[in-house]
Image: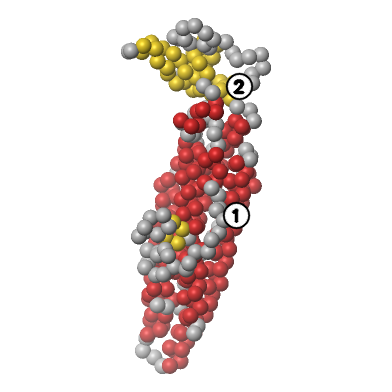
């Protein structure tokens, strides 16, 4: 059974079908597209880190502030009516929080479905335009502001910790979702070009054979102008190669020194994965761990967001009693 960082027992995770299989990108076996300068927005790590930190601090500050207010209401010197009123606020707040967590968990499940659909589209060789649009509109609606005005100062410290951890986890899910959408949106031309390799493979790399210290060796070159494997009329006799785009004779037999040999497209991705696909696999894997939990590291197991929410709801349901 996994335990969250707060130390409270988690709900037993219910088996759910795998959400994405790393978004299907692991099965793409195609060469990297021409490595033109990629948009810098893809690697906006600092922006996302700032969002995560801001969301975390918002949850903690608001929770602490409302806890102080709730504590004053619950334990201030006063008559029975005042204490009963504070308890009533806490009971109503627990009920409201339970409903809000239910709504947030539904959005997490919806997010899983959207990412699954995007992975299927990529496996089928299609860019997931509809899914990228859906990711932009979808947001899991729970953060520190949900804790305000709920009388949480009357809650047990364990429940307060669970609520803060849940708000922080939801913030991370929303941030990770936006990172995936950014990778797909900004790198759409590169992804579409890579996906097209299945039906229309292009020769994008070549090996120029030169004299080396101990004999002939090859130098990898990105071709400024790729050409289809099934080029009508045959492959060009001269191929532009290197940064200067100098035309080099294509090797056709005999001594290969000073000539260029095209590289088979289907072999390139096995050696040099594209930056876009590596980034995409990493971001999807991180989102998967947030939504489904991570039980792979003994002693450091974590529950998924939905399981965390279900555990909190059970605690909140007992407050009314």
- 107 left or right of 271? right
Q: Who's the residue at 52% across and 51% down the image? A: 177
In the displayed structure, 121 sits above or below 230; it is below
Cα gap from disc 2 to disc 1, whole angstroms: 37 Å
In this figure, which residue is indicated by the disc labeled 1?
Answer: 113
Of the numbered discs 2 and 1, the one sitting upstream in the chain is 1
The crowd level at tag 2 (other Cα within 10 Å; few <14, some 14-19, many 20+) is some
SS of the residue under disc 1: helix
In the displayed structure, 18 sits above or below 265; it is below
In this figure, which residue is indicated by the disc labeled 2?
Answer: 229
In the displayed structure, 302 sits above or below 151; it is above
SS of the residue under disc 2: loop
Query: Image quarter for residue 63?
Result: bottom left
Give x and y (percent) for residue 127. 62, 40
Q: Nearer the viewer, residue 56 or 271?
A: 271
Give x and y (percent) for residue 284. 50, 48
* Image quadrant where one finds the N terminus: bottom left
Q: Who's the residue at 47% across and 68% down the image? A: 11
- 75 left or right of 278? left
């Amino acid at each position: 059974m996994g335990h969250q960082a707060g130390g409270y027992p988690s709900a037993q995770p219910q088996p759910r079908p795998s959400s994405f299989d790393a978004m299907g990108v692991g099965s793409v076996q195609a060469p990297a597209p021409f490595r033109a300068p990629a948009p810098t927005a893809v690697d906006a790590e600092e922006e996302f880190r700032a969002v995560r930190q801001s969301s975390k601090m918002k949850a903690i500050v608001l929770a602490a502030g409302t806890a102080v207010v709730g504590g004053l209401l619950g334990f201030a010197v006063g008559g029975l009516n005042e204490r009963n009123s504070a308890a009533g606020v806490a009971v109503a707040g627990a009920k409201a929080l339970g409903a809000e967590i239910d709504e947030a968990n539904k959005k997490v499940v919806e997010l899983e479905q959207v990412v699954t659909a995007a992975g299927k589209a990529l496996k089928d060789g299609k860019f997931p335009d509809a899914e990228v649009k859906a990711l932009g509109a979808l947001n899991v609606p729970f953060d520190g502001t949900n804790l305000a005005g709920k009388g949480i100062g009357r809650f047990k410290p364990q429940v307060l910790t669970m609520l803060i951890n849940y708000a922080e986890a939801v913030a991370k899910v929303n941030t990770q979702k936006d990172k995936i959408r950014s990778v797909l949106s900004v790198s759409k031309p590169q992804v579409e070009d890579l996906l097209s390799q299945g039906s229309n493979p292009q020769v994008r790399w070549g090996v120029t054979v030169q004299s080396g210290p101990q004999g002939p060796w090859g130098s990898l070159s990105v071709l400024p102008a790729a050409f289809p494997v099934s080029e009508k009329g045959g492959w060009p006799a001269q191929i532009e190669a290197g940064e200067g785009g100098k035309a080099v004779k294509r090797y056709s037999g005999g001594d290969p020194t000073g000539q260029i040999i095209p590289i088979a497209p289907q072999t390139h991705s096995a050696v040099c994965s594209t930056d876009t696909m590596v980034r995409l696999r990493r971001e999807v894997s991180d989102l998967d761990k947030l939504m489904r939990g991570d039980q792979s590291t003994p002693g450091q197991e974590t529950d998924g967001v939905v399981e965390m929410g279900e555990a909190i709801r059970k605690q909140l349901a007992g407050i009314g009693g």
